[in-house]
Image (spheres, rainbow, N blue to C red):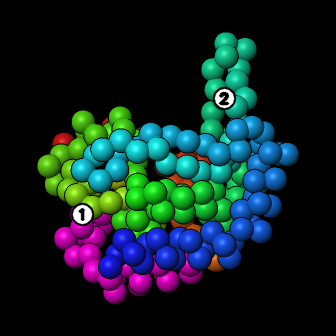
Amino acid sequence: MKRLFDCVVSLLALIILSPIIVITAMIVRVFIGNPIIFKQQRPGLFSKPIYVYKFRTMTNETNDEGELLPDQLRLKKSGIIIRKLSLDELPQLINVIKGDLSLVGPRPLLMEYLPLYNTKQLKRHEVRPGITGWAQINGRNAIGWTEKFDLDVWYVENQSFLLDIKILLLTVKKVLLSKDISSDTSVTMEKFTGNN
């Protein structure tokens, strides 16, 4: 039921949002540069590696030593707007159709975090990761890692079709209000370093 719902909704969303997707791609190409799509390996269901797609929101600017500049210097105005409207997440609808992601589930984080999870936190990988999730509608990047993981595990233990519908509706509200995009101290979420 969930997989069928994911595929149908994602296909409809790709069709309906295709003009927005094309415009976003053009903005990325002109103001941020190539490649338009950012691809990164993340842990999927049962921690199996997958590649997640997003529109790029940061440039590839480097310093004199060839190292990438800090995020806040590479995140331009166009990237900030794309993030505020969550347009950078739209390519992940393709991930849903492929079966890598679900519309709703714990967000897929970095592969390097896997060895840092405790036993409870690892439960977040017992379901397919999602474009949005329980943690996203309850704080997104404005809450700390421990609380975020607690919310993810709560979802795994209490998931249902009605809960997914509730999360999707509240996600739309969050996006329209542009709430909790960044943490208090960074334009992106601080790295997880473990709390075992």
| Nearest to the observer: residue 92 or residue 163 | 92
For residue 94, which quarter of the picture? bottom right
Query: In this image, 16 relative to 31: left or right?
Result: left
- For the point 35% across and 45% down, the residue is 43
Q: Main secondary structure of the magenta part?
A: helix
Please check the rendered image and state whether residue 107 is part of the magenta-colored stretch, yes or no.
no
Q: Which amino acid type is shown beneath numbered disc 1?
A: Val
Image quadrant occupied by the C terminus: top left
- For the point 36% across and 65% down, the residue is 105
- For the point 81% across and 53% down, the residue is 27
The answer to whether 61 is drawn above or below residue 141 in the figure is above
- Whole-percent x and y of residue 134? 37, 71
Region rendered in magenta: 148-175
**Mark 1, secondary structure of its residue:** helix
Q: CA distance from mark 2 to mark 1?
A: 34 Å
Q: Which residue is mark 2?
A: 69
- Whole-percent x and y of residue 98? 46, 57
- For the point 34% across and 86% down, the residue is 162
**Mark 2, secondary structure of its residue:** loop
Q: Earlier in the sequence, mark 2 or mark 1?
A: 2
The answer to whether 9 is drawn above or below residue 130 in the figure is below
Q: Which residue is mark 1?
A: 153
Q: Are marks 2 and 1 in contact (CB under 8 Å)?
A: no
Q: How many marks?
A: 2
The answer to whether 133 is drawn above or below residue 82 in the figure is below
For residue 36, which quarter of the picture? top right
Q: Is residue 7 visible?
A: yes
